[in-house]
Image: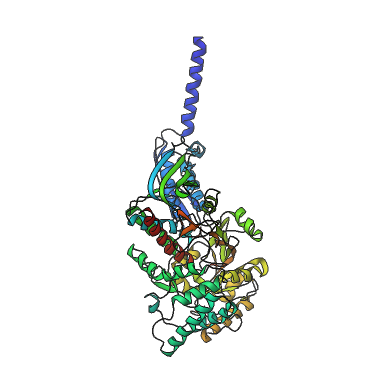
Amino acid sequence: MKKIGKLLLSAMMAMSLVACSSAGKGVSGEYTGTAKGLGGDVNVTLTLKDSVITDVKAEGKQETEGIGTKALEQLPGEMVEGNTINVDGVSGATVTSDAIKEAAKEALKSAGLNPDDYATANAGKKEEDVTKDADVVVVGAGGAGMTAAIVAANEGKNVVVVESQSAAGGNSVRATGGMNAAKTTYQDENTFEESAGVEKTLAAAEAYKDNKDIAALTETVKKQWDEYQKDPKGYFDSTELMELDTMIGGKAVNNFDLVKTLVENSADSIEWLSTIGADLKNVGQFGGASVKRIHRPVNDQGQVVSVGSYLIPILEKQVEKEGVEVLYNTTANKIIMKDGKAAGIEAEGKTGNKVTVNAKAVVLATGGFGANNDMVAEQNPDLKGYITTNANGAQGQGITMATADDVNAATVDMKQIQLHPTVHVEGDNAVLITEGLRGDGAILVNQSGERFTDEVGTRDVVSAAENSQEGGYAWLIVDQKMADASAVIQGYIDKGYAEKGETYEELAKAMEMDEKTFASTMDEWNKCVESKKDEKFNRTTFADKLDTAPYYAIKVQPGVHHTMGGLVIDTNTEVLDTDNNVIPGLFAAGEVTGGVHGANRLGGNAVADFVVFGRIAGTQAADYVG
């Protein structure tokens, strides 16, 4: 027996030595690996001590701000904590997350180690169930949720936010354009040249003359326009004109009371953002708007930058400043109801543990359901299998929770799902190309090299026009002058999304289309810009000629972008039940709601939506708590 014991002991020691050898015991130092990310190379440097990962640094200068950069920030710490490269990626940043893990694998190889020995997921033990008490619980840490949390906390309320993903932002961080607002001081800094746009809107309103709200708005705008033309000083816009644009864009399906609330609070919300350090002072043109109305951030060089990746970090800092607790990786699945009133939420933590937040008021800001293709297809079978620009968290959870039998919230416009016409497919990823390119002067051409629509029409119209082209796609054309003025455009170029040509013919060759036809289209367009007249498609905004080489083309197609339908709310953001009664203590803001945008959302109105109604939800929830 002793002999057998010695043999077993020897075998165990041998196995231990093999394991130590396999893990590369004794390797210390810094080792770097590189992998391809979404925008370029991602570099990961591992610090090893006796083959244990003690530090990780990840760098990817071209990764998307607010999305890919979140993965660069989060994954290194998790690798160190678990001594593993098998960590969960950040939702919405799959390419960057995978690149970080692949680069870490290469770093281990350069150290002479076997990456498989560091591939065990650090699942850890299931965390304990948690119960918290708050005045207000906000579900969702996107733009609407964080805005509501900031405002409620500023009112002195104890606020807890639960977020299903590992980072804040939701769809809001993906917003590339800006925020629509009417009658702002920043509009007055522009020269008014868009008279054709106003006339076009007034003409379009004739189709809705039987709608009393649109008819009244049309009459008011006509009077305002006549008065302005008599003495054209300053920049022409009005709340009524923005309301008219929004109602026409939404095909008169919108709830007019919500539209008025959106518009009448838009200018003040621009100023509120300034109070927390978010300045949107550059004003540009977007589809469906009669005049320049979309307010955008700029960088230190004066270039326009993406509004979502600009705003979300500022909102995050303000949430932290207000002392709001945010529970990430915590998916709400039930609204707690007591005596017919919302009294908190139940959720599931990352490890499957139960998280309960008892609260006096609940704010739903979970976003829409654009990332849930089954839910999208259920509402519109024609959209089954469509690519989407949505963050992974846009699964419709808020709608599902609120429509449960014990809550009984009503929904509206659920079949109204918007396609965005300029989505670029890069590998397995759908990349949203901002509408600002078209507003600032870009054009669309089909594979024959010809224009086929008014590029700054509403998204539904432009998307339908693209779908009718050969292959169901188009090419978005810009020049170097546009790229120089926009960090957003330059970012697309740097990430390899664009074809390039020093001449029109060279660009056409890169797009594999007839060179003479495309060159003729470009010359014809530049003449339209000169004359400020587009005979073919009646476009009314022109910006500058596309005549500064080199030239760039981005291949785009329609993708599921925004779900206009959702929970029914009143102008105080109170959620209504199926009998049109207020559900006490339950509020909602942002894309989880319906009625604001009707059958089609105008670009720039989503940011206005989450700021305006997020502020109202925070205020009303705080007032309800008392």
Residue located at (55% from left, 70% from top): 250
Q: Is residue 280 above or below residue 371?
A: below
Q: Is residue 214 above or below residue 332?
A: below
Q: Is residue 99 left or right of residue 26?
A: right
Q: Where does the image place residue 478, in percent across and percent down from the top left? A: 52, 73
Residue located at (52% from left, 84% from top): 532
Viewer-side residue, 157 vs 193: 157
In this rendering, the count of numbered labels is: 0
Outermost residue toward the top in this view: 1
Viewer-side residue, 49 vs 234: 234
Q: Where does the image place residue 241, in percent across and percent down from the top left? A: 48, 77
Decide if residue 510 is in sight here: no
Decide if residue 490 is in sight here: yes
Quadrant in which the C terminus is drawn = bottom left
- Give the image quarter of residue 178: bottom left
Colour scheme of the picture: rainbow
Residue located at (51% from left, 78% from top): 216
- Give the image quarter of residue 150: bottom left
Viewer-side residue, 30 vs 168: 168
Q: Where does the image place residue 402, in percent across and percent down from the top left? A: 52, 52
Q: Where does the image place residue 323, in percent across and percent down from the top left? A: 33, 51
Viewer-side residue, 441 vs 219: 219
